[in-house]
């Protein structure tokens, strides 16, 4: 693995030295983004790339179309700069700099997606965003609380949807069909752009039908049968039955279907621009493959474990007033999410449904002021309200009788509110190529959750409440050392307020091993992140970015043994399970490095590569021993070669991951060590060999052609060598060799 990484780095540097610069205009000018490229998310308003001190990865709509991703999680994987965990096919949980789930903030069209039930484990909400509707996706690495508030410890993933426009009347329908052979999946999208001088309209509808995913045949580990599924749970004559899988590479119970709808209306009255944005994502049923493939003493643990449904609704209104130098933007939005979890032990007749609904309303008032060429002030107010309702229902699958049972969260409702003000100034000194920026945010946050006197846990309290006022700040410097060469440095403080999931959840994260119960006494997690990097670009020649980072986290929330009503274990689903609670008990340190390069080797032959390494530890107190932190991926990245033609491209790519040794796994269980290959010794001291994640390399080839008539065709062969491998911390294996095809037509 070290050889692969070293060769990638050397190849990048050698290519830079020998890069050929052709003065002839290329057929494709987007291979190396301009040094003056405008970003949409870094400062909530537009800002040039050369002015931001952050590490940022941009995935354009053009690149999304080339990648043909089944979901946005797959698109992030192919950047080589973002690690993604999967517990089931209907899931993707991005990891930024060792932070995951509720410690990574997702924002769509300026509105935060993270709601009061975003959990700290693995989160799947990114799959509810349709890749077809995006103009671009920006990954902002590093702390981002000053501009975006709570949760942005590891960074911000910003999704910008396509824009409706005004102009000469025209109607442009489009359609796309995609096929993936590894899962026998079909994705169909139809859309329409209607433009007139007064109103612009965008419409899109996508239907995704995913079949069961087939893994590779050549195992990456010393265990030739690891990850294969010889048996699976099915039903015969209405009874749970263990069935023989005639094709062990086929991960039965991974397929699902999803429908995504999108509409955007744009109009202008006088100097005010109006935008109405509607999004809806609906899934039928998403099986939890990692749980359904669990066996204990030769017997399946579950007879059923499904997300049904996993829905997201979004509607927003935006008004923008003013000119380029001074303008105000008001965005009002409401998001509704609904998640149902249906679980039943193997052979049991009682089936539990826990259904959680969140209504989140937000108001953002952003102000942009440009004072001459040297100073910019961005400021604003953000208001966020969450209302959470959670119910539990037991259903006898034989008699269909239903009774109330344990809810996942507080059974009498919960709500949160967050009111924030922020300001950030950007000072430019063009003569020296210096840009200094700094900002501050003050947030007031409150949470209240109510429990009925009849709650099944017999909690010693009827309400959990929390309130705090939290500051955050950032300070950054970019210094142009020569034409195209930029030095970047920043320090950022970020925070994450405990939410309804942290404080009120009842959840058996490991059946029979760990039962999380409500925690009434929590406070905000806080981090301070230092970044130092260099960016060297020459348009149509090369781009090199390298940097190091370090985050210090205090008041870190960790699962700790606890008690409820004096008991350290409770009966849950027929199992006596130890009680755990979240507590602010630790300090943590996360550090790492990254290297990204894109180089033109000869004419239209391009090479790109990236590698990221992250280390993370925590201590329960200042004098305690260091312990591995969860969510820390092994070294990972990608290397590729690409040839561009007139309307076409061909690309070869290698995605790679290093080894995650058994002793580097967290003991929290979040890294799913029990779902990794066995054979690295008894690290935990329980008399059994512990799991580890071997190094692997996955080879892909893809190409595409776009005709001037509007017809486009793409073809890819992913996992060319049919390797059977599994991403770190994942509960399912990646897809085997897959032929992916896409045909699109712009009418």
Image: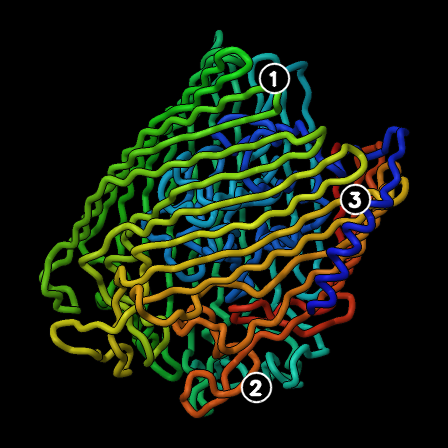
Q: Which residue is mark 1?
A: 166
Residue 240 screen position, x and y as percent: 44, 83
- Of residues 204 and 601, which is closer to you in this image? 601
Question: Is 157 displayed left or right of 625 in the figure?
Answer: right
C-alpha gap between disc 2 and disc 1: 62 Å
Residue 418, placed above or below residue 450: above
Q: Residues within 10 Å of mark 1 (few under 14, many from 20)?
A: some
- Quadrant of the image occupied by residue 624: bottom left
Tags 3 and 1 in contact by the CB under 8 Å rule? no
Q: Determine the CA span between mark 2 and mark 3.
A: 40 Å
Q: Is residue 17 visible?
A: yes
Q: Residue at x 72, y 36 (%)?
A: 537
Foreground pick, 169 / 446? 446
Of all residues shown, which one is farthest toward the top? 270
- Residue to which mark 2 is pinned: 679
Q: Nearer the viewer, residue 451 or 193?
A: 451
**Where does label 3 land, which residue?**
599
Residue 109: x, y in percent?
Answer: 49, 34
Q: Identify the residue at image location x=77%, y=54%.
A: 640
Task: Work out whether residue 90 can be spotted.
Answer: no
Of helix, strand and loop, which one carries label 2? loop
- Which mark's residue is nearer the viewer, 3 or 1? 3
Name the foreground residue: 608 vs 225. 608
Looking at the rendering, in which quadrant would you find the C terminus? top right
């Amino acid at each position: 693995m070290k050889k692969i990484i070293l060769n990638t780095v050397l190849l990048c540097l050698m290519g830079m030295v020998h890069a050929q610069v052709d003065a002839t205009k290329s057929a494709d000018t987007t291979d190396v983004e301009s040094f003056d490229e405008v970003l949409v998310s870094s400062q909530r308003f537009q800002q040039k790339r050369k002015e931001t001190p952050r590490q940022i990865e941009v995935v354009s709509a053009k690149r999304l179309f080339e990648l043909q991703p089944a979901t946005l999680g797959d698109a992030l994987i192919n950047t080589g700069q973002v690690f993604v965990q999967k517990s089931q096919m209907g899931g993707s949980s991005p990891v930024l700099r060792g932070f995951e789930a509720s410690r990574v903030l997702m924002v769509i069209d300026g509105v935060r997606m993270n709601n009061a039930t975003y959990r700290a484990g693995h989160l799947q909400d990114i799959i509810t965003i349709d890749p077809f509707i995006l103009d671009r996706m920006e990954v902002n690495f590093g702390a981002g609380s000053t501009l975006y508030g709570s949760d942005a410890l590891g960074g911000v993933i910003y999704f910008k949807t396509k824009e409706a426009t005004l102009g000469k009347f025209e109607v442009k329908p489009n359609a796309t069909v995609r096929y993936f052979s590894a899962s026998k999946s079909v994705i169909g999208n139809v859309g329409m752009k209607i433009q007139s001088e007064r109103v612009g309209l965008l419409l899109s509808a996508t239907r995704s039908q995913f079949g069961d995913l087939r893994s590779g045949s050549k195992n990456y580990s010393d265990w030739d049968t690891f990850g294969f599924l010889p048996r699976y749970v099915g039903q015969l004559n209405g009874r749970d039955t263990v069935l023989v899988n005639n094709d062990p590479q086929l991960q039965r119970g991974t397929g699902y279907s999803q429908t995504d709808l999108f509409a955007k209306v744009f109009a202008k009255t006088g100097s005010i621009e109006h935008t109405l944005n509607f999004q809806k994502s609906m899934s039928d049923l998403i099986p939890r493959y990692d749980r359904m493939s669990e066996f204990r003493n030769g017997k399946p643990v579950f007879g059923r474990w499904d997300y049904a449904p996993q829905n997201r609704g979004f509607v927003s209104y935006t008004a923008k007033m003013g000119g380029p130098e001074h303008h105000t933007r008001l965005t009002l939005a409401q998001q509704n999410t609904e998640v149902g979890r249906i679980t039943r032990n193997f052979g049991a007749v009682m089936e539990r449904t826990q259904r959680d609904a969140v209504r989140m309303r937000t108001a953002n008032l952003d102000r942009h002021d440009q004072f001459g060429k040297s100073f910019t002030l961005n400021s604003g107010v953000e208001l966020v309200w969450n209302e959470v309702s959670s119910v539990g229902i037991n259903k006898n699958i034989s008699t269909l009788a239903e009774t109330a049972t344990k809810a996942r969260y507080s059974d009498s409702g919960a709500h949160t509110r967050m009111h924030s003000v922020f300001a950030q100034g950007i000072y430019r000194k063009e003569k020296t190529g210096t840009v200094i920026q700094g900002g501050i945010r003050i947030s007031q946050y409150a949470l209240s959750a109510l429990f009925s006197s009849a709650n099944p846990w017999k909690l010693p309290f009827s309400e959990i409440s929390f309130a705090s006022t939290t500051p955050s700040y950032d300070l950054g410097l970019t210094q142009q050392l020569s034409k195209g060469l930029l030095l970047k440095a920043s320090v950022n403080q970020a925070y994450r307020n405990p939410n309804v999931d942290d404080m009120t959840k009842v959840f058996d994260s490991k059946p029979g091993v760990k039962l999380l119960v409500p925690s009434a006494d929590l406070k905000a997690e806080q981090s301070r992140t230092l970044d130092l990097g260099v960016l060297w670009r020459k348009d149509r020649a090369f781009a090199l970015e390298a940097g190091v980072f370090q985050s210090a986290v205090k008041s870190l929330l960790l699962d700790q043994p606890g008690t409820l009503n004096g008991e350290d274990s409770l009966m849950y689903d027929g199992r006596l399970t130890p009680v755990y609670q979240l507590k602010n008990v630790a300090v943590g340190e996360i550090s790492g490095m990254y290297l990204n390069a894109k180089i033109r080797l000869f004419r239209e032959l391009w090479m790109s590569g990236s590698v990221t390494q992250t280390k993370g530890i925590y201590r329960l107190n200042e004098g305690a021993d260091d312990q591995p932190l969860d969510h820390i991926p092994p070294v990972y990245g990608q290397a590729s070669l690409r040839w561009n033609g007139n309307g076409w491209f061909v690309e070869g790519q290698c995605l790679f991951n290093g080894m995650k040794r058994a002793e580097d796994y967290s003991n929290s269980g979040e890294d799913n060590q029990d779902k990794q290959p066995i054979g690295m010794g008894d690290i935990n001291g329980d008399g059994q060999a512990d799991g580890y994640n071997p190094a692997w390399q996955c080879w892909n080839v893809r190409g595409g052609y776009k005709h001037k008539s509007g017809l486009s065709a793409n073809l890819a062969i992913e996992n060319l060598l049919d390797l059977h491998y599994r991403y770190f911390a994942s509960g399912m294996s990646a897809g085997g060799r897959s032929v992916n095809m896409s045909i699109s037509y712009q009418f």
